[in-house]
Amino acid sequence: MTDYVISKPDTTSLTVVGEDDRFPVRRIFCVGRNYAAHAREMGMDPERDPPFFFTKPSDAAFDAGVTEKASIPYPLDTRNFHYEAELTVAIGKGGTSIQVKDALEHVYGYATSLDLTRRDLQLAARDKGRPWDWGKAFDLSAPTGPICRRDDAADLDLKKSVIRLFLDGQIKQDATLGELIWSVPEIISTISDSIELKPGDLIMTGTPAGVGPIMPGQDLKVQIAGLPDTILHIDERLNSLNA
Ligand code: MN
């Protein structure tokens, strides 16, 4: 057994519907601009951009929507904190150069998620050609609902299921998974052409149009037909620097 000089970090894990055991999170890959209308609202041309990816640390993920309402503080260092509703794919079987036709065999299950974003930091980085990490990869930035095993997700339709975000009960994002520019099998295949996917990896597949700001005290819900909801409350700001 290996001894460590400081206490070993915990493994981040997520609830699985109908299981006592939890899904261990290894890495989080996120797809940029995967719905045409969202690419346009971000000022980009959706037709000419091949898929691209960014990442979040594994411990950005946490259960949101299991029993009691999850909450996070309004994050540090931003004045423009945004929601993005997304379908998340949990990888159960790894691989490289995975064919599109075989890709869904690598899926353990699916969940709803929020790709929480410090939009001011992301856009400032984007406009200077710098990495997006400070806008995207901050603490608690990937709240995720319970994972539904692929075999149990009969009511999820990767083409027809509606994806919606509710802010204080009002619909702000409303699309179908069929509007994804790059489908779930294509995303898995593309990532695996560049790096080796491994069990425990999560893939957040991108957000539809309608992203916008969240304020302290507000409630978010991500709904995808056939999956459990992600539910999150935003608490007060962490410190007065954000005021
Ligand atoms: Mn996103």
Image: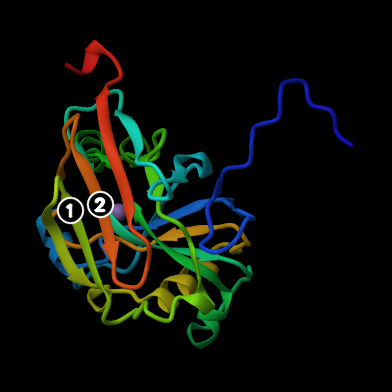
Q: Do callouts 1 and 2 mark residues in contact (Cβ within 8 Å)?
A: yes
Instruction: Give the image location of residue 74, x and y in percent.
Output: 27, 28
Q: Secondary structure at mark 1?
A: strand
Q: Establish if 188 lies above or below 30.
A: below
Residue at the (39%, 42%) spot, across then down: 68
Q: Considering the image in quadrants, where does the C terminus appear? A: top left
Quarter of the displayed picture in which ligand 1 can be seen: bottom left
Instruction: Give the image location of residue 98, x and y in percent.
Output: 56, 78
Residue at the (52%, 53%) spot, across then down: 15
Residue at the limit of the structure toward the top, as seen here: 240
Q: Is residue 72 visible?
A: yes
Which quadrant of the figure has residue 110?
bottom left
Residue at the (17%, 27%) spot, across then down: 79
Can you tell which mark lies on residue 166? Answer: 1
Instruction: Give the image location of residue 33, x and y in percent.
Output: 25, 61
Task: From the viewer's perspective, tell me whether residue 190 is left or right of residue 172.
Answer: right
Instruction: Give the image location of residue 34, x and y in percent.
Output: 27, 66
Q: In the rendered structure, which disc, 1 or 2, sits on the residue that comes first in sequence?
A: 1
Q: Secondary structure at mark 2?
A: strand
Q: Is disc 2 surrounded by few (<14), some (14 to 19) or many (20+) residues within 10 Å?
A: many
Q: Is disc 1 surrounded by few (<14), some (14 to 19) or many (20+) residues within 10 Å?
A: some
Q: CA distance from mark 1 to mark 2?
A: 5 Å
Task: From the viewer's perspective, tell me whether residue 38 is left or right of residue 15.
Answer: left
Task: From the viewer's perspective, tell me whether residue 26 is left or right of residue 143.
Answer: right
Which quadrant of the figure has residue 112?
bottom left
110 or 180, nearer to the observer = 110
192 or 23, nearer to the observer = 23
Can you tell which mark lies on residue 221? Answer: 2
Residue at the (65%, 32%) spot, across then down: 9
